[in-house]
Amino acid sequence: MKRFQRIVILFILIGVIVVTYGLEFYGKYTVPIIMYHNAEPAEVAGSLNSVSDENFEYQMAFLKRHKFNVVSLSEVVKAINEKRSLPHNSVAITFDDGYADNYKHAFPILKKYGFPATIFVVAHLVGREGYLTWAQIQEMERSGIDFGSHTLWHPYLPDLTCDQQKKEIAGSKFFIESHLGHPIHHFSYPSGGFNDDSKSLVREAGYMSACTTNRGYSRLNQDVYEIKRIRFGNKDDVYWNILAKLSGYYNLLRKTVKPN
């Protein structure tokens, strides 16, 4: 009898835990937005911000195999503005900095799987050694890759005056648009750092959204000018780790970091 009572108590405890966490997570699904930087050959990939072409292929194949709905950043932002939910298997892909290896190693794999992505380029670094060229950017655009701004020179915005921030934010938008011949809609804060001036200037410049890292106070990405993203790299090659990051509840488990 005592054994039966212990089993009953155990099931009650499990039920309480399930209900408690279920209520905590209920209605708090957030479309995961992946953040990459470098995509490199396996023999050199190893830093926190780097993913090997082999692991990038594995991660994209994971999305395909598990029938994830890979959407553009614009679709995510539109859904947030309309207070509309996307399917719970949705995911968006972004890259920061605009490295040349994005074209050489990531772009062929994105084309293979037919996945959209957004690449945030540092405007004055385009065409320099190690970075994308304007010709590569235009070729990638024709295959469904979107481009946004990551400022003119990649400064840490909270360290700048309001006028300096405006030059980096609005100036980069004008510079990129003048080369591409069409508007760009998305911005990414270098190192994820921003303040109230940054957000206001991004909005005033005409951007639809701004992405950060894990900084800010909008845990559920309800503010389109501080969209949290999830870092992916070379260490994300374990099934359960990837699944957890793409669950849509990962932001609830992460520590909130101040914006600046």
Image (cartoon, helix red, strand yellow):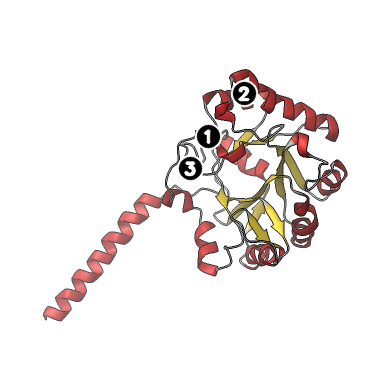
Identify the residue under disc 2.
Answer: 201
Query: In x, y percent, where is residue 66?
Result: 61, 66
Q: Residue furthest left?
A: 1
- What amino acid is labelled 3 in the image? Leu
**Marks 2, 3: nearer the viewer:** 2
Instruction: Check the picture and name the quadrant holding the N terminus.
Output: bottom left
Query: In x, y percent, where is residue 249?
Result: 47, 53
Residue at x 63% of width, y 33% of height: 155
Tell whether 108 sits left or right of 77: right
Marks 2/3 in contact by CB < 8 Å: the verdict is no
Of callouts 2 and 3, the N-terminal one:
2
- What amino acid is labelled 1 in the image? Asp
Label 3 – label 1 distance at C-alpha: 8 Å
Tell whether 184 sits left or right of 237: right
Query: In x, y percent, where is residue 222?
Result: 51, 37
106, 80: nearer the viewer: 106
Residue 220 tag number: 3
210, 21: nearer the viewer: 210
Tell whether 213 sits left or right of 104: left
Residue at x 34% of width, y 55% of height: 21
Label 1 – label 2 distance at C-alpha: 15 Å
* Label 2 SS: helix
Can you say whether 217 is above or below 43 in the image?
above
Disc 1 residue crowd, few under 14, some 14–19, many 20+, Cα 10 Å: some
Residue 135 tag number: none
Quadrant location of residue 149? top right
Marks 1/2 in contact by CB < 8 Å: the verdict is no
* Label 3 SS: loop
Identify the residue under disc 1.
Answer: 223
Query: In x, y percent, where is residue 47?
Result: 61, 57
Label 2 – label 3 distance at C-alpha: 22 Å
Can you say whether 11 is above or below 152 in the image?
below
